[in-house]
């Protein structure tokens, strides 16, 4: 999933503030994720998506206990 960044919320529970996490060069970040098309109602497809997370790296560790899995390059196409 390409993205220009993501938010992490910091601060005490009653005063959370968003922190914008992004690349310094402005390029896109590629997140690992999974999607699925399914039918909640007949003839009405739904697409759901989730971003896979992992243990934080040294930069993210002080901010949050997890982070999105960031890909170095797009995975090869299958099929």
Image (spheres, rainbow, N blue to C red):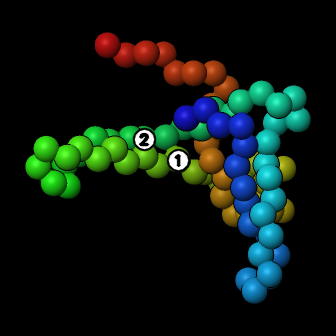
Which numbered circle lies on residue 2? none
The residue at 72%/55% (across/down) is: 7
Q: Could you say where residue 62 lies in the image, as x and y percent from the top left? A: 83, 62
Asked if the residue under mark 2 is in contact with the one under mark 1, i.e. CB atoms within 8 Å, the reply is yes
- Identify the image quadrant of the C terminus: top left
Q: CA distance from mark 1 to mark 2?
A: 7 Å
Which residue position holds label 2?
34
Secondary structure state at the residue bearing disc 1: loop
Q: Could you say where residue 22 lies in the image, as x and y percent from the top left? A: 79, 42
Task: Report the side of 75 relative to 7 (left or right).
Answer: left
Q: Image height check: is 19 above or below 34?
A: below
Which residue position holds label 1?
52
Q: Could you say where residue 61 lies in the image, as x and y percent from the top left? A: 79, 58
The residue at 66%/52% (across/down) is: 67
The residue at 43%/15% (across/down) is: 77
The residue at 37%/16% (across/down) is: 78
In-front residue for pair 26/57? 26
- Identify the image quadrant of the N terminus: top right
In-front residue for pair 75/2? 2
Q: Image height check: is 52 above or below 27?
A: below
The image quarter containing residue 70 is: top right
Say few, some or many: other residues with alpha carbon within 10 Å of mark 1 (under 14 / 14 to 19 / 20 or more).
few
Task: Report the side of 69 relative to 10 (left or right).
Answer: left
Q: Image height check: is 65 above or below 42?
A: below
Say few, some or many: other residues with alpha carbon within 10 Å of mark 2 (under 14 / 14 to 19 / 20 or more).
few
Secondary structure state at the residue bearing disc 2: strand
- The numbered mark, 1 or 2, whose residue comes first in the sequence reads 2
Task: Report the side of 1 relative to 34 (left or right).
Answer: right
């Amino acid at each position: 999933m390409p993205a220009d960044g993501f938010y992490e919320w910091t601060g005490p529970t009653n005063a959370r503030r968003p922190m914008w996490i992004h690349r310094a060069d402005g390029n896109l970040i590629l997140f690992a994720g999974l999607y699925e098309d399914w039918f909640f109602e007949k003839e009405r497809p739904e697409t759901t998506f989730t971003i896979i997370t992992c243990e934080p790296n040294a930069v993210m560790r002080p901010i949050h206990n997890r982070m999105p899995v960031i890909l170095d390059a797009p995975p090869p196409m299958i099929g």
